[in-house]
Amino acid sequence: MNRRSLASLAALVAVAMVLTACADDGDDGTAGESPAAGGEPTGEPIVVGSTLSLTGAFAATGAIHQIAGEQFVEQLNENGGLLGRPVDWTVLDDESDQAQVTQLYERLISQDQVDLIMGPYATPNILSAVAVAERHGYVLPQHTAVLAPLLTYECQFPAWSIGTTPNEYVPEQLFDAVESLPTPPQRVAIATNQNGSTDFVGYGLPDDDSDPGMVSIAEDRGYQVVAEIRYPPSTTDWAPIATQIRDANPDLVINNGIGVDPVNLLTAMGQLGYQPPMMFSLFPAPGPPLGLGAAADGLMSVSIFESSDATAADYGEDAAAIVAEFESRAQAAGLPYTAFETQAAASWNAWEILVEGVENAESLEHQEICDALHEDGAETTFSGELSFDPDDNNFWPSTQGIKQIQDGTWVMVWPDDRATAQLRPPVG
């Protein structure tokens, strides 16, 4: 797979700076004084605005995106900036509140008049940001939204793809993985957060009874669904859910959850003296489950990259340097899990998509950036070459796999060509 290095980034920046230096200052203010390759960028900063969930329910994951973004912008500026100009990143705390996301992106665009925007974390927040971006005609790279059928704006660009039908892709991949075991599970309990993306994976689109999801696909593949639970995102009392799961006695617990949902559920089950034989959680913050120790061992989730992966060497020296620097910053920030993994990789992808769009357009005009990404795609360090087809809502063929906590570390276990460890069977 072709991987983008920081050296090639510097070369592209240098080319863009030469082209810019040869042009007169345009009305859009994109031209700047060209520094030497790798030198200090000059001129007015290009301002990128975004929100992140720095507090609230999504804060554990928002912190990962903040560290990755700060690292990317710093390295970008060290390599000449963007179009020869320095880049500033303005981050506002959306407090994990979808309503605030709308207000804050309106402020960033209408009042602060930022040049570019970057998406927030979590699908509901991203949907709100996309609506604002579309009203104003802004390009929006976004890290993690998976509700592909609803992301119809042609200038939103996903940095993490589970294809155009994640409500089918995720269940099929999970069941393929567990059915590779000598004794596959037969009885499943499914607990689904009614948040947009997690509910979508669990049940498909709400207005389409024929749309498949985790529950219907499990039944179609011959599993006995012994418990089916839907809970609101605001859930704080996990004991009733834990009790229902324990009493159902499943072989596999599937938590279509987000953030610290699996931590809350595992803790509640542990207080009942119960540990599920096998468990999968959809979009957990990566660090908090590890804090549970043995109670979380064997937990599975989805991933596009794990730095514990032995194949990480295939990504090149620049990728290794990115991973090491992130881990140093995450440790300094006190993150409970400092490894560069799927959330950080998605964040890095999003920034590379934005930079490539601007460089290839040689402009800060949003329609030109959007057109350039459709025409040329983007080279990313951790997901390779991406192409964006508006007919597929810009979602590219998935590189997702299944990871599992083994001996206190997340490792890739599925599919076979990406696995660095064997999927461990149920406990007990």
Image (tube, helix red, strand yellow):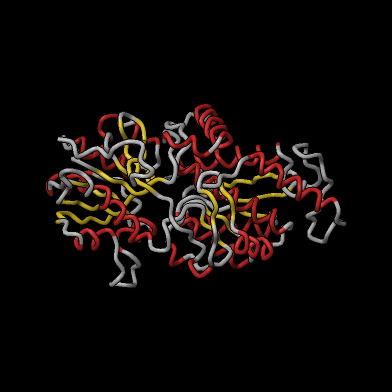
Return the residue nearer the eye: 423 or 121. 423
- Residue 72 placement (x, y as % from top left): 61, 40
391 on left or right of 272 = right
> Quick one: 325 or 296, which is closer to the camera?
325
The residue located at (15%, 47%) in the rendering is 250
Residue at the spot 43% in from the left edge and 38% down from the top edge: 306
Residue 9 % position (x, y): 66, 44
Count of numbered circles on the image: 0
In the displayed structure, does residue 412 sit left or right of residue 277?
A: right
Q: Seen in the image, is 154 located left or right of residue 297?
A: right
Examine the image and state in which quarter residue 112 appears.
bottom right
Q: Position of residue 134 (x, y in %)?
A: 58, 66
Q: Is residue 165 above or below residue 115?
A: below
Quarter of the image with the C terminus in it: top left
Percent coordinates x, y for residue 60 in the rendering: 44, 40
Which of 85/391 is in front? 391
Q: Quadrant of residue 358?
A: bottom right
- Identity of the residue drawn at 42% across and 34% down: 310
Q: Looking at the image, which residue is at 51% across and 52% down? A: 159
Compare residues 258 and 146 and report the one nearer the observer: 146
Q: Is residue 44 visible?
A: yes
Q: Quadrant of residue 57?
A: top left
Residue 112 in view of the camera: no
